[in-house]
């Protein structure tokens, strides 16, 4: 837990509403991002965000402090989202194994981006379309896989923190991330292969009229670079 | 790693900043010599970046005006949870916080019993317990019965390895942590 979180939690436990307000201000957008990523509905995501902080307030005295405040908070949010989805019964996730069997055979080739990407940098239009494909693939993941991916990609939590937040083992976090990403990667693979169809052999520039635009599509992920020394 | 085969899980852990310094050096050496892995990493970064952009947009666009006031009004209106409920949640939180310690301790104790009890009941000089060609006078009692325990963990599975020097036996016990985690998922208190 960050030093500031620790102090705010301590004060909020004593009933200091300003401290509790500080925690809400700090985490409300993150909480909403998780909720929205899970339930895909802005109104429900806002309700869940509020409900999460109401629960935090009510049960703050039970928070043990062995883990970070935010891992505890995110666990509450994910559980509320899962409860919501089960009540609504709107969620129709593909089992990841089922999806993998159809989209990406379990071999190392599935992870390799076609060379098209080297030869034809993504245009702004391509990025938008690919982004939609990836969002669709994300929405098709099971709730468990989306939760793990959200906490990793949006909140930047370590495997250890994700494990604590979701009450699962670290190995399970790695396994779920692996399969979730494999599905997203299959979306990229499928998209690039579709775009590559009809491309005459030996004409690497023919894919996009505005080739050269948005060449930073493969720029290194700053978060990964920042934390890779861990 | 440059001479080693490609390892996707290493790339994923690199993407997440979860490699040790040694592992990172190995991977960097491999990436220098492996265009396939460089491409795979580029693809992972591309997808990760696009997904993050996509998922962050709704939170940036959402209207949070009056959010804190609504939450505070709701908590002021509602009654405090009853003592029994708070104790139940507190107990669940306590168990969760200490679970890794007691699970490991319990597993170790059970396995130690399973291995040690049969060995001790067999006695120090049981001929069948000796390895082929083994010298039964070479080892002192107690040293023969030494049990070396190791524990490995990979993708939700744990393995415990016991090497029993007395009868040259190696026991590998694998168990799936997912099952325990799944049970926990169902019984969450909050």
Image: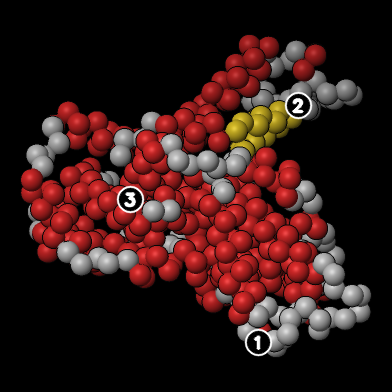
Q: Is residue B97 left or right of residue A147?
A: left
Q: Tell me which colouring the rendered structure shows.
A: secondary structure
Q: Chain of mark 3?
A: A
Q: Is residue B166 left or right of residue B106?
A: right
Other-residue count near label 1 (Cα within 10 Å), few / some / many at <14 / 14–19 / ≥20: some
Relative vertical location of residue A68 with respect to residue B142 in this rendering, above or below: below
Q: Quadrant of the C terminus of chain B?
A: top left
Q: Are marks 1 and 2 in contact (CB under 8 Å)?
A: no
Q: Residue at x 17, y 54 (%)?
A: B71
Secondary element type, mark 2 = strand
Mark whose residue sits in front, 1 or 2:
1
Who is closer to the viewer here, A173 or B105? A173
In which quarter of the view is residue A58 placed? top left
Residue carrying label 1: A213
Q: Residue at x 58, y 25 (%)?
A: B111
Q: Residue at x 43, y 67 (%)?
A: B56
Question: Which dot marks residue B8?
Answer: none
Residue carrying label 2: B169
Who is closer to the viewer here, A229 or A110? A110
Q: How many marks?
A: 3
| Gap in angstroms between the C-alphas marked 1 and 3 | 38 Å
Relative vertical location of residue B91 with respect to residue B69 in this rendering, above or below: above
Q: Residue at x 54, y 31 (%)?
A: B179
Q: Is residue A217 left or right of residue A60?
A: right
Mark 1 or mark 3: whose residue is earlier in sequence: 3
Q: Residue furthest right?
A: A201
Please determine if labels 2 and 3 lie on a single subunit.
Answer: no
| Gap in angstroms between the C-alphas marked 2 and 3 | 58 Å
Whole-percent x, y for residue A49 in the image: 29, 54
Residue carrying label 3: A44
């Amino acid at each position: 837990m960050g030093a500031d979180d620790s102090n705010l939690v301590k004060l909020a436990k004593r009933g200091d509403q300003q401290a509790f307000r500080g925690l809400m201000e700090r985490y409300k957008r993150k909480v909403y991002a998780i909720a929205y990523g899970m339930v895909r509905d802005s109104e429900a995501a806002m309700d869940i965000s509020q409900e999460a902080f109401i629960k935090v307030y009510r049960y703050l005295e039970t928070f043990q402090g062995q883990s970070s405040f935010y891992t505890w908070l995110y666990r509450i949010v994910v559980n509320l989202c899962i409860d919501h989805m089960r009540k609504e019964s709107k969620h129709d996730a593909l089992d990841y194994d089922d999806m993998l069997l159809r989209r990406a055979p379990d071999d190392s080739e599935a992870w390799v981006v076609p060379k098209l990407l080297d030869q034809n940098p993504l245009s702004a239009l391509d990025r938008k379309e690919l982004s939609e494909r990836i969002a669709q693939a994300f929405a098709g993941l099971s709730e468990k896989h989306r939760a793990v991916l959200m906490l990793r990609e949006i909140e930047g939590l370590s495997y250890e923190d994700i494990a604590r937040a979701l009450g699962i083992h670290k190995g399970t976090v790695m396994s779920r991330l692996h399969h979730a990403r494999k599905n997203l990667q299959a979306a990229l693979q499928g998209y690039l292969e579709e775009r590559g169809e009809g491309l005459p052999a030996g004409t690497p520039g023919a894919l996009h009229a505005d080739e050269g635009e948005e060449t930073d599509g493969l720029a290194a992920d700053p978060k990964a670079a920042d934390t890779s020394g861990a | 790693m440059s001479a080693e085969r490609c390892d996707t899980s290493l790339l994923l852990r690199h993407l997440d900043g979860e490699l040790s310094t040694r592992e990172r050096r190995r991977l960097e050496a491999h990436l220098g010599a492996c265009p396939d892995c460089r491409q795979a990493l580029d693809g992972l970064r591309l997808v990760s970046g696009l997904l993050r952009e996509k998922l962050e947009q709704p939170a940036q666009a959402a209207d949070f005006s009056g959010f804190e006031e609504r939450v505070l009004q709701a908590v002021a209106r509602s009654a405090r949870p009853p003592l029994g409920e708070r104790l139940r949640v507190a107990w669940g939180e306590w168990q969760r916080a200490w679970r890794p310690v007691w699970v490991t301790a319990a597993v170790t104790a059970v396995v130690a019993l399973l291995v040690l009890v049969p060995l001790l009941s067999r006695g120090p000089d049981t001929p069948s317990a000796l390895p082929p060609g083994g010298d039964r006078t070479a080892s002192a009692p107690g040293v023969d019965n030494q049990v070396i325990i190791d524990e490995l963990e990979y993708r939700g599975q744990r393995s415990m390895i016991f090497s029993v020097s007395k009868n040259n036996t190696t026991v590998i016990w694998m168990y799936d942590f997912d099952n325990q985690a799944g049970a926990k998922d169902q019984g969450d208190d909050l």
